Image: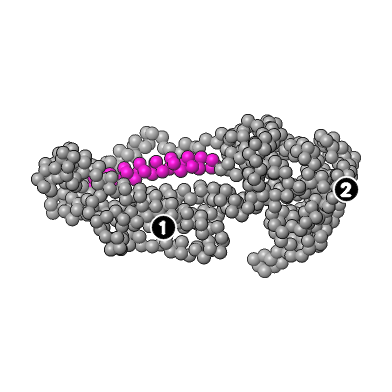
Amino acid sequence: MNGETAIDEGRLNTRLPHKLTLISIVGMLVIWVLVALIAGKNEIGNRMVPGPIDVATAFPQFANYWTGDLGVTATQVGGEVTWQGTVLGLFYNTFLTLVHAVGGVVIGTVLGLLLAVATSWWSPIRQALAFPAHFVRLLPLLAMAPLFALWFGGENHTGAVLFVALTAFAFVFPIGLAAIASVPPYYEQYARSLGASGLQSYLRVIVPAAIPGIRGGVTLAVGFGWSAAIVAEYMTYPYGLGAIVKNAAFFGSTDLLGALALLTLCLAATSFVLVRSLLDWVTRWAE
Amino acid sequence: MAGLTQEAGEAASQGRPPAIELRNVSQQFRLESGKKVQALDNVSLKVEPGEFLCVLGPSGHGKSTMLNIVAGFLQPNSGEVLAGGKPVTGPGADRGVVFQRDTVFMWKSVADNVAFGMKARGVPKAEREEKVERYLRHIGLEQYGEEWPKQLSGGMRRRVAIATVFANEPDVLLMDEPFVGLDYARRSALHKVLMDLWAESQRSVLFVTHDIDEALALADRIVVVVKGQVVLEERLSMPRPRGVAEITGDEAVEIRGRLLEQLDPEASGVV
């Protein structure tokens, strides 16, 4: 071995020490409470900025968004607000949003990656698509949500899923193109000098080499997928967390809006951690 | 060490075309400013079968351009390049390249890297596995076959790149300053690995370097390229393996003197 040793390159631990993390969380809670107290209340007595207790006590309102059955009657037809109704309302609407978010992100990401890989194969096409790719990134996506309701109707999942898919695509496709374009040319030269054909070099060398550059686009797509799903439901769909946001805003229920924000934050953070773990595994070979 | 010398190389080459032949090759580049740079100027050169040829010269004087043209990565403005008597029209498995840069595929295990060329060319799995094992043993990395390249040091990755190219059994190896940036000990270790593989395979090597000691340690023949032209050719008859005693001996000192004369900025106008 001539004195050479294998180097197991562990990642540097960049996390803040636990104590500092705890202090920052407590600090944020204190600021949140202070802002809630200072901001005052609206005409119907809800705080303009809901405090932590307002948010916690708003969760039973999810019972109002349970459509009934499984032994729990919907409140719209005379049922009581119960913890079972709260749990069912919470899970039912979260599940719908999850379907829209995950379905859309998966479709948009897969399509974005496939199209980026397919169109990067031939450099003239890649160059020709450089401007449209930037154009997709600049699309006013949120303003386009109502179009999906018009195109696909507001009572089915199609419009919401496809809107989220467009959002994910808008992140993944241009970043995929850029990642493939930035693979150093000597990788392909090396592969060709080893006897690989053009297609083999592309699929076995250039595309894998681009994966670490693509992971940022996928992570962004997941993060924005939740927001896009809520926007789609807000504008097009009668159920899901986005539909609850619409009702809560209509009735000035700032506490419920706060609860929805907290719930969405938890969902997005969980999905982010899961996707990052998956991407860490996929790129476990990268330095 | 088998001690494959220039004489042995010439014997092996009897009746065979040169492994590589450059005929009046010129290459010009146009810079962003519009200025033209003559990277190669009417270069003619042969690499005989089994020969280890070192191309020595200052940085930016056409060595790598020559190698890229032989590899088929560049088409010369004029002249002709032949590999085994056939015109070079592009990259090919008959001319394996070891780059100055780290080209090991990070997403493939060490063993899969070594097997890459063979797999691309459709070599049967059993034969691939046998060769991978053999070449990993040659380079002293047999216990690292299943590891990712990121777990290896820089020197170990260079060995993987060399094993990958040798395992693919090209007719000619083209090496573009493959050991640049390594310390003396690692470089010497890699020289030994390279010499062992070369002696066993008896393939031709075109080795680009700017390091005189490296050229003296490895070459059957050294050509000096300055300003895109071959300005000196030296044949070496020193025995192998060449250690400190050989590359500081009388023959080496004489050759070194002549090489330095060509590379001296004041004498040759090198910049």
Left or right relative to B234: residue B80? left
Per the image, the residue denoted by label 2 is B14
- The answer to whether residue B22 of the structure is visible from this angle is yes
Q: Label 1's element? A: helix
Q: Magenta residues, as a range? A: A258-287
Q: Is residue B233 magenta?
A: no
Disc 2 is attached to a residue of which chain? B
Q: Alpha-carbon neighbours of circle 2 within 10 Å: few (<14), some, or many (≥20)?
A: few
- Residue at 69% across, 44% down: B168
Q: Amino acid at mark 2?
A: Gln
Q: Label 2's element? A: loop
- Residue at 22% across, 54% down: A238
Left or right relative to A36: residue B271? right
Per the image, the residue denoted by label 1 is A170
Left or right relative to B22: residue A243? left
| Residue nearer the viewer, B67 or A199 | A199
The percent position of residue B238, horizontal first and vertical second, equals: 87, 40
